[in-house]
């Protein structure tokens, strides 16, 4: 991963998210509800909930909002009817795309996702058609300007806590973990007061693909925009080299 910074893209997404923070908080609220239903309201004993809380904090969700969401979900477990579903396919130029959704109506979500691919001149594939091109990893991005720790100290802290890899970019540090080690590493950094621009378990492409054709670029951007605007879509992963 070294040499391929995602920090600028993360900042861009943060700016877009700030303009639609209500939607982001709604998405995370759904994830909290499902995590509580599946594993209970205590993040110390619920790994999935701990992951969602980390995501909430990296999106600047206030602690009291997180706590309210957990308490509401704990008292409303029987009424939580959302389920996770994943779609895979190709955008223009052979760009691999994975879509994670959390929905109470799979037919609606499937139709919307298929429409987003079609309108961008891409197509939905069968499960597993592109996921083999990605690795599931815990990823923590740290803004160098916000972090007072020296790079070597930060690296040793992360590796000692169980991280797999540490890389330096011009404007950021990236820490990668095995999914099972993500929460211990994130907690160690949080306990040390390290500010994190992003902290979540994600799908990281093994290789990135560049697009130069303007028509393909416009089609891909249309698909990604439609997916990001869909309330059921939780996350979109792709191997397009946006730099």
Image (spheres, rainbow, N blue to C red):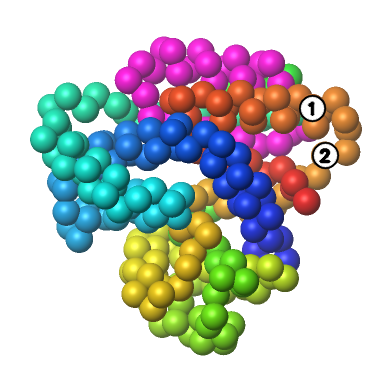
**Residue shown at 62%/71% (left/top)?**
145
Please tell me whether residue 99 belongs to the stretch shown in magenta.
yes
Crowding at label 2, few (<14), some or many (≥20) Cα neighbours within 10 Å?
A: some
Residue 165 picture quarter:
bottom right
Identify the residue at image location x=79%, y=27%: 218
| Crowd band around label 1 with a 10 angstrom C-alpha radius: few (<14), some (14–19), many (20+) | some
The image shows residue 57 at horizontal and vertical percentages of 39, 54
Q: Earlier in the sequence, mark 2 or mark 1?
A: 2
**Rendering coords of residue 46 (x, y %):** 21, 53
Query: According to the image, label 2 marks what residue?
Result: 211
Horizontal and vertical percent position of residue 32:
28, 41
Q: Which residues are magenta?
A: 93-120
Q: In the image, is residue 144 above or below residue 219?
A: below
Q: Tell whether 77 sits left or right of 242.
A: left
Q: Is residue 160 magenta?
A: no
- Residue 76 coordinates in the image, percent (x, y): 14, 31
Residue 79 appears left or right of 132: left
The quarter of the displayed image where residue 194 is located: bottom left
Residue at 80% across / 44% down in the picture?
210
């Amino acid at each position: 991963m070294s040499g391929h910074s995602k920090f600028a893209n993360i900042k861009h997404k943060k700016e877009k998210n700030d303009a639609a923070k209500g939607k982001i908080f709604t998405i995370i609220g759904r994830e909290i509800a499902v995590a509580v239903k599946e594993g209970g309201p205590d993040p110390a004993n619920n790994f999935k909930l701990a992951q969602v809380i980390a995501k909430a904090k990296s999106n600047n969700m206030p602690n009291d909002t997180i706590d309210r969401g957990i308490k509401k979900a704990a008292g409303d477990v029987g009424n939580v009817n959302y389920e996770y579903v994943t779609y895979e396919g190709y955008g223009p130029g052979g760009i691999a795309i994975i879509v994670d959704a959390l929905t109470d109506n799979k037919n609606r979500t499937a139709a919307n996702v298929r429409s987003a691919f079609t309108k961008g001149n891409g197509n939905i594939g069968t499960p597993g058609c592109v996921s083999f091109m990605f690795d599931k990893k815990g990823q923590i991005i740290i803004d160098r300007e916000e972090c007072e720790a020296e790079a070597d100290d930060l690296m040793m802290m992360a590796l000692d806590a169980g991280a797999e890899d540490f890389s330096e970019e011009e404007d950021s540090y990236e820490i990668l973990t095995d999914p099972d080690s993500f929460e211990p590493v994130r907690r160690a950094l949080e306990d040390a007061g390290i500010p994190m621009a992003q902290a979540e378990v994600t799908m990281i492409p093994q290789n990135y693909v560049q697009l130069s054709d303007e028509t393909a670029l416009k089609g891909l951007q249309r698909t990604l925009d439609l997916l990001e605007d869909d309330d059921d879509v939780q996350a979109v992963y792709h191997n397009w080299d946006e730099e």
